[in-house]
Image (cartoon, helix red, strand yellow):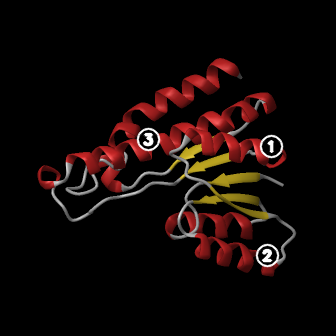
Amino acid sequence: MKTILVTGAARGIGKAIVKRLYSRGCNVIFTYNRSEQQAKELASSLHAEGNGAQVTALRCNLANQEEVKAMVAVNKDLFSHIDLLVNNACIISNPSQLFLLANLNLWWEVFQNNIRCVVNTTRSVLPFMIRKKQGRIVNITSLSGICGDPGQSAKRQGFQYNHQHLLLSSILERV
């Protein structure tokens, strides 16, 4: 049975990913930051299905490296079995605001938050995958992260270019 970590999964695309993976018999760990009620409801509804797989919801601000380290340390047994990491967590600011009109401090906050979520989580999970000599990492981005969008241009632009080289290099050098 595969164990999969999905970040930012209390609602939206992350929630749909969790539900699909769980329905296929995977053990699923998912993170949330602010959507505690939605996370509890998702975990409860999946537990009620009782398909034999496990589901675990963990609260964590993934942009904070110390919180990610603490989450992994406290749940080391869970994380040592991860076969797949789905980096889905992100924030957006004002999706309808044009880039030139956006508050530059807020733009950088969104940009840095979204990059940190991916980097912090990947750096925490990758050592377990390297020890197992197996594992996969999937990075979710929106269409606006690939081709740009007036208000969401900070969402994943920097990550889109750099993540492939960073992650593939890390995996290939150590496995």
Which residue is pictured at 21% across the width and 46% down the height? 104
User: Identity of the amino acid at label 3?
Assistant: Ile
Callout 1: few (<14), some (14-19), or many (20+) C-alpha neighbours within 10 Å? few
Q: Which mark is residue 47?
A: 2
Q: Is residue 44 above or below residue 80?
A: below
Callout 3: few (<14), some (14-19), or many (20+) C-alpha neighbours within 10 Å? many
User: Residue 15: where, in percent of width, then height?
Assistant: 58, 68
Q: Is residue 171 above or below residue 89?
A: above
User: Identity of the amino acid at label 1?
Assistant: Lys
Callout 2: few (<14), some (14-19), or many (20+) C-alpha neighbours within 10 Å? some
Which residue is pictured at 55% across the width and 63% down the height? 14
Front position in the image: 74 or 51: 74
Q: Residue 131: which quarter of the image?
A: top right
- Of mark 3 and mark 2, the one earlier in the sequence is 2
In the image, farthest residue toward the right:
52
Q: Residue 172: which quarter of the image?
A: top right
Q: Which mark is residue 129?
A: none
Q: Quadrant of the C terminus?
A: top right
Label 2: state its secondary structure: helix
User: Residue 78: where, in percent of width, then height?
Assistant: 80, 49
Is 70 situated left or right of 143 in this image?
right
Q: Which residue is mark 3?
A: 115
Confirm or deny contact between disc 1 and disc 3 (CB under 8 A): no
Q: Is residue 14 above or below residue 107?
A: below
Q: Which residue is mark 1?
A: 76
Is 89 situated left or right of 55 in this image?
left
User: Residue 58: where, in percent of width, then height?
Assistant: 68, 59
- Of mark 1 and mark 2, the one earlier in the sequence is 2
Q: CA distance from mark 1 to mark 3?
A: 24 Å
Q: Quadrant of the N terminus?
A: bottom right
